[in-house]
């Protein structure tokens, strides 16, 4: 399989396993690669704009991709199929982070908000909108009880 058709902007290992790496590109796709032989295992297409963030869940079974189209997509790593599309942001999704259990994902967006999503149902369960400028990152703590966000609002 061929590589990306535009720049690669983000990447992630499926830690702690380390046998796969995902790359996100301005060609609007994500590719999953084998670290054993360097081959492309699958190409994930579904975004309408650049893929700018991605992360594997802690168990390595799914990967989440975020795009400038304002959506995040949860993908099944083995089949390469989309499990759910997370829509609700009005700006690009620039940060994604799974909780340590893998049942929640937090998305940070250029729309100044972060959303917490229940991965099992593909729905937003909370919106954090205390910032006044674009978010640059959003992370869960290890327990999944807290989220930290950072923003261009300093």
Image (cartoon, rainbow, N blue to C red):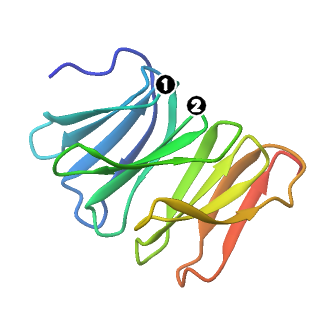
Q: Relative to the observer, which residue lies in front, 124 or 139? A: 124
Mark 2 burial class by Cα count in 10 Å: few <14, some 14-19, many 20+: some
* SS state under label 1: loop
Estimate the x, y position of residue 132 in percent, counting from the top left.
90, 49
Estimate the x, y position of residue 76 in percent, counting from the top left.
26, 52
- The quadrant the N terminus occupies is top left
Q: Residue furthest left?
A: 37
Q: Viewed as shown, does residue 114 lie left or right of 33?
A: right
State yes or no: discs 1 and 2 in contact (Cβ < 8 Å). yes
Q: Quadrant of residue 43?
A: top left
Q: Residue at x 37, y 63 (%)?
A: 57
N-terminal label among 1 and 2: 1
* SS state under label 2: loop
Q: Residue at x 73, y 40 (%)?
A: 110
Residue tagged 1: 48
Q: Quadrant of residue 90?
A: top right
Estimate the x, y position of residue 97 in percent, counting from the top left.
52, 60
Tell me: residue 16, above or below residue 150. below
Tell me: residue 108, above or below residue 33. below
Mark 1 burial class by Cα count in 10 Å: few <14, some 14-19, many 20+: some
Estimate the x, y position of residue 94 in percent, counting from the top left.
61, 42
Residue tagged 2: 69
Q: CA distance from mark 1 to mark 2?
A: 6 Å
């Amino acid at each position: 399989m061929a590589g990306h058709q535009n720049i690669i902007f983000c990447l992630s290992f499926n830690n702690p396993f380390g046998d796969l790496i995902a790359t996100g590109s301005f060609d609007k796709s994500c590719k999953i690669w084998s670290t054993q032989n360097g081959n492309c295992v699958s190409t994930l297409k579904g975004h309408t704009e650049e893929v700018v963030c991605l992360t594997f869940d802690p168990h390595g079974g799914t990967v989440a991709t975020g795009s400038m189209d304002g959506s995040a997509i949860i993908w099944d790593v083995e089949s390469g199929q989309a499990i759910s599309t997370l829509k609700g942001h009005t700006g690009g999704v620039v940060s994604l982070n799974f909780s340590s259990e893998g049942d929640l994902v937090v998305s940070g967006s250029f729309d100044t908000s972060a959303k917490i999503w229940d991965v099992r149902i593909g729905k937003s369960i909370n919106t954090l909108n205390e910032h006044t400028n674009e978010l640059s990152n959003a992370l869960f703590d290890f327990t999944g009880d807290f989220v930290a966000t950072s923003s261009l609002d300093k």
